[in-house]
Amino acid sequence: MRDHLQADGTAEVREGWFVRTAERIGDLGSPFYDEEHQRDVWNEASAVGFQLVLWLLPVAAVVSVWVGGATAIPYALVMFLAAGLASGVVIGFAQARGLDLGAAEGYTVLRWRMLVFVVLFAALCVGVVRAAPEGSFGQGTLWGMLVGAAVAIALLAWGGRRARRVSP
């Protein structure tokens, strides 16, 4: 979903199926959100809980592969992908509602978190390759996933750098 700038420079908010579905899942129409202080505290508490889950799932995925071996691989991948999907939904919802994440003050401070996430991803990948049975179809597939993920990360980093150079 792409934002379109209005004449005053603000992003036009699009209320598509994604936003409607997210609002329904989050029960954002509840009377609970009518009182501003209550809404703000709940949103902050939700953000803290979300960040906790965001960090616990990848750490649990890495630990489970290193401790559990080959039998833990599918579960570890699901845990790691669940954290990524949740992050993607949060970012997509914020952008769909007109928030420019690149313009947020302190955004560059968040880069260390991406570095930690990449280190966790690397530890997961090494653990998965180590745990996969030698000569199995799964090991070839895992190497393909690793190369694909490395290319995707490089393309995302390149795209983000390019977008920052283009923006005023």
Image (cartoon, rainbow, N blue to C red):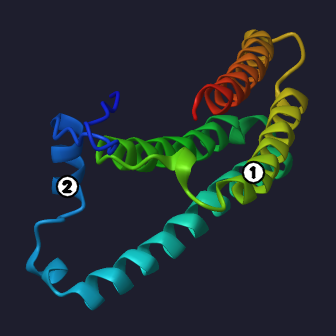
Hey, what amino acid is under mark 1?
Arg
Tell whether 162 sits left or right of 12.
Answer: right
Name the quadrant containing residue 136.
Answer: top right
**Picture coordinates of residue 79 (x, y %)?**
59, 47
The amino acid pointed to by label 2 is Glu
Q: Residues within 10 Å of mark 2 (few under 14, many from 20)?
A: some
Give the total number of marks visible in the rendering: 2
Image mark for residue 99: none
| Viewer-proximal residue among 28 and 104 | 104
> In which quadrant of the rendered image does the C terminus lie?
top right
Residue 104, given in percent of the width and then of the height, sits at 55, 56
- Residue ID for mark 1: 111
Image point (18%, 65%), residue name: 28
Quadrant hosting residue 145? top right
Rounded to the nearest angstrom, the CA distance separating label 1 from label 2 is 29 Å
> Quick one: 63 or 17, which is closer to the camera?
17
Give the residue drawn at x 75%, y 19%: 142
> Is label 2 in a helix, a strand or a loop?
helix
Residue underneath mark 2? 23
Q: Could you tell me which secondary element the residue under label 1 belongs to?
A: helix
x and y, in percent, of residue 100 in the image: 45, 46
- Identify which residue is drawn at 44% across, 78% down: 44
Give the farthest residue toward the front.
Answer: 8
